[in-house]
Amino acid sequence: MEPLLSGSDFNQLRAFVAVGELASFSRAAERLGVSPSALSQTVRALEERIGTRLFNRTTRSVALTEAGETLLRRVRPAVSELGDAIGAMRASRGRPAGVVRIHAFRSAAETCLEPILPAFAQAYPDIVLDITLDDAVVDLVAGGFDAAIRIGEVIERDMVALRLGPDLRHVPVATPGYLAAHGTPAHPRDLVHHRCIRWRWPGRMTPYAWEFCDDGTWFEVAVDGPLIVNDKEMALRATLQGVGIGFPVERTVSQHVAAGRLVRLLEPWCATFPGLYLCYPRQRQMAPALRAFVDALRNPAAVQASGATPPVVSVCPT
């Protein structure tokens, strides 16, 4: 009968799974909090122990061998289960602890994250929130994230998704000065004759095509204009400066519309779409630290301040 896993056995398998998921020693090392050289030695020790090469390595890439793919399929669920079990046992002896890595759209920072931070920091002094603000749609598992906050339209089907806010809608806006100089579009297709400020999803080459709805049917307008950005705040500032017509989320410009700095356009064709959701991979047993974060987002009023020393909160905009 094979003896139980030793601590070094588990560490080797955990290292192997991290590299296999991320296809990168440097990123896996960052996830595990070790140096790339130490991680490489750990994986080589596993390969020597089982007598099989698990990765094909070059100076630029890392890829699983056929044997590595087979092993990863078999051991990844077990390693995850063991990690969750150990975390649960630790939590049962005290307060939730550990690092929760969150990937969030920039729009979620002000509306969802920042309001809960003071109470959460006091209630859970042993939890570190490592937050990356980025409008890219990333693979949570490959990126080493525990959860994400993003709009409902870009959530994978196999994710657990919890609504955090109301539906949203984009609406074209322009300054009174721009409209006086260039006229007011009467239909969304008139926008092709206007100077529009376009936005591009991070990591994509083609700008987002503006979407409108006519009697329940959505259609796109490929607008043109003098400016393409991948930052919505910059797009809004350019709109306020009269550079062209912007297409922001309505709630972000309501104050400017009320003050007369911007004018809403084409509202009959502007329909709502799913707003912000918290999403995370399905799992048998959620880590206590992640459960505390999920509960805090779903019910901020329930987070009780304990008066303890706040945890580290790392916010990384990309």
Image (cartoon, rainbow, N blue to C red):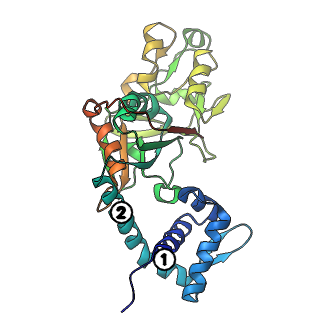
Amino acid type at image mark 2: Ile
Between disc 1 and disc 2, whose residue precedes? 1
Quadrant containing the C terminus in the rendered view: top right
The residue carrying pointer 2 sits among few (fewer than 14), some (14 to 19) or many (20 or more) residues within 10 Å by Cα, namely few
Residue 247 image offset from top left, x and y in percent: 51, 27
**Residue 9: assigned label:** 1
Q: Position of residue 233 (x, y in %)?
A: 56, 26
Q: Pointers 1 and 2 in contact (CB under 8 A)?
A: no
Viewed as shown, does residue 10 lie left or right of 175?
left
- Residue 219 sits in which quadrant? top left
Give the residue at x 42% y 9%. Answer: 258
Tell me residue 124's x, y (percent): 36, 39
Q: Is residue 269 above or below residue 127?
A: above
Q: Secondary structure at mark 2?
A: helix
Residue in the picture at 46% in, 32% down: 109
Please rate how many residues cluster around mark 1, counting C-alpha atoms within 10 Å: few if below 14, some from 14 to 19, many from 20: some
Residue 74 lies left or right of residue 207; in this view the side is: left
Q: Quadrant of the N terminus?
A: bottom left
Q: Residue furthest bottom?
A: 1
- Does 120 appear above or below 202? above
Residue 308: x and y in percent read 38, 33
Residue 54 visible in the displayed image: no
